[in-house]
Image (tube, rainbow, N blue to C red):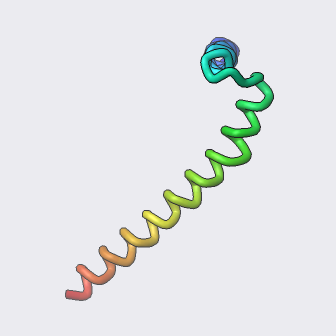
């Protein structure tokens, strides 16, 4: 688990350098904006697919 955490920190540090951002700013962008937006998007997809499946089963 510690190795995975260190790898993720290294990756975020590398990405922040590549993008010209600080590590903290990149964390905010990922975990306060991208992650919630992705969760909302996936929930919308799930509900649409559930509706399609329900309609197909009804015939």
Furthest residue in direction front, as rendered: 20
Residue at the image point whose x is 49% and y is 66% from the top: 44
Between 5 and 45, which is closer to the camera in this rendering? 45
Q: Quadrant of the N terminus?
A: top right
Residue at the image point whose x is 60% and y is 54% from the top: 37
Image quarter of residue 15: top right
Q: In this image, 54 relative to 18: left or right?
A: left
Q: Where residue 11 sits in the image (x, y, percent)?
A: 61, 17
Residue 31 in the image: above or below residue 6? below
Marks counted in the figure total 0
Q: Where residue 16 sits in the image (x, y, percent)?
A: 67, 21
Image quarter of residue 17: top right
Between 5 and 12, which is closer to the camera in this rendering? 12
Q: Where residue 4 sits in the image (x, y, percent)?
A: 62, 18
Q: Quadrant of the C terminus?
A: bottom left
Residue at the image point whose x is 44% and y is 64% from the top: 46
Q: In this image, 44 relative to 54: left or right?
A: right
Residue 22 in the image: above or below residue 32? above
């Amino acid at each position: 688990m510690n190795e995975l955490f260190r790898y993720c920190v290294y990756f975020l540090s590398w990405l922040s350098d590549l993008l010209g951002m600080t590590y903290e700013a990149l964390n905010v962008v990922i975990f306060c904006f991208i992650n919630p937006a992705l969760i909302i998007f996936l929930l919308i997809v799930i509900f649409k697919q559930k509706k399609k499946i329900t309609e197909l089963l009804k015939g």
